[in-house]
Amino acid sequence: MIAHKKEFYGGFVMNIGFWIVFAIGMSPLFNGQNILNYMDNLYNTISKKSAYYIPKVQKEVQEYKGQQVTLDIKAGSSEQAERFAKLFAAGNAQVAVDGVNVKVEGGLGVMLDNMLSDADVAFDNDGDAIAAKYGMEAKQVMYDWWYALKEAQKDLNKQKMFKEAKIISKVQTRGVEPAYNYYGIKAENIKDKAVIVIVSLVGYVIYTLWFGFSILFMFEGWGLKLEH
């Protein structure tokens, strides 16, 4: 039995309205995207500049110029191992491939500088420059660099070269990873998008409360109440 029809039907109408708005939001009405994809892309564009750490990391790797290292890394496949060989060779390293096992010998600073240079180009969305250098798509190059760095860090830790492993990790997480994640995204200034950002945040709060109150009114209409 419905104890309070006014509250119940008011909440019911609110709930129906909530799902109507949800259906509209999931439709490709926002530049061919649904609202979730549109807002995700918006926040990616305004956060890109704040994720640009490459110049700072480039300065840090200069300390390792002239330091020679030997890395034994394991690729995910023989095809990836061959791609590793091409990538590391661009950093003046000597590379030997045996199946999925890749042995790299060369200057750590030079190799890292090459990786960061690639990351900088990819972060700037210049896929053509990456393709011209390696004959591969930029995202593939960034993924392979990320994977190679992960394996290189493991090997350096085994060699107890912890300082070198730390800079490898920094190049991976603050250079290559953001370049991969933000590739193809145009950086925007948050000031230029301030109105839509504020509207989206306020709208999110209102929309969440809308659903919550619709359920609350329906429960109260049924005669259910929270007591303590």
Image (tube, rainbow, N blue to C red):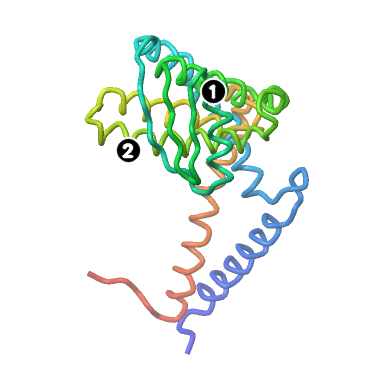
Mark 1 nearby-residue class (10 Å; few <14, some 14–19, many ≥20): some
The residue depicted at 66 percent of the width and 28 percent of the height is 134
Q: In the image, is residue 59 above or below residue 20?
A: above
Amino acid type, callout 2: Lys
The residue depicted at 53 percent of the width and 50 percent of the height is 206
The residue depicted at 57 percent of the width and 23 percent of the height is 118
Residue 84 vs residue 139, the one in the foreground: 84
The residue depicted at 76 percent of the width and 50 percent of the height is 29
Q: Which residue is mark 2?
A: 154
Q: Nearer the viewer, mark 1 or mark 2?
A: 2
* Residue 49, label in figure: 1
Mark 2 nearby-residue class (10 Å; few <14, some 14–19, many ≥20): some
Q: Quadrant of the C terminus?
A: bottom left
Q: Is residue 137 left or right of residue 211?
A: right
* Residue 71, label in figure: none
Residue 1 percent coordinates (x, y): 47, 90
Q: Is residue 11 left or right of residue 158?
A: right
- Name the element at disc 2: helix
* Quadrant of the image occupied by residue 154: top left
* Quadrant of the image occupied by residue 224: bottom left
Residue 74 percent coordinates (x, y): 43, 43
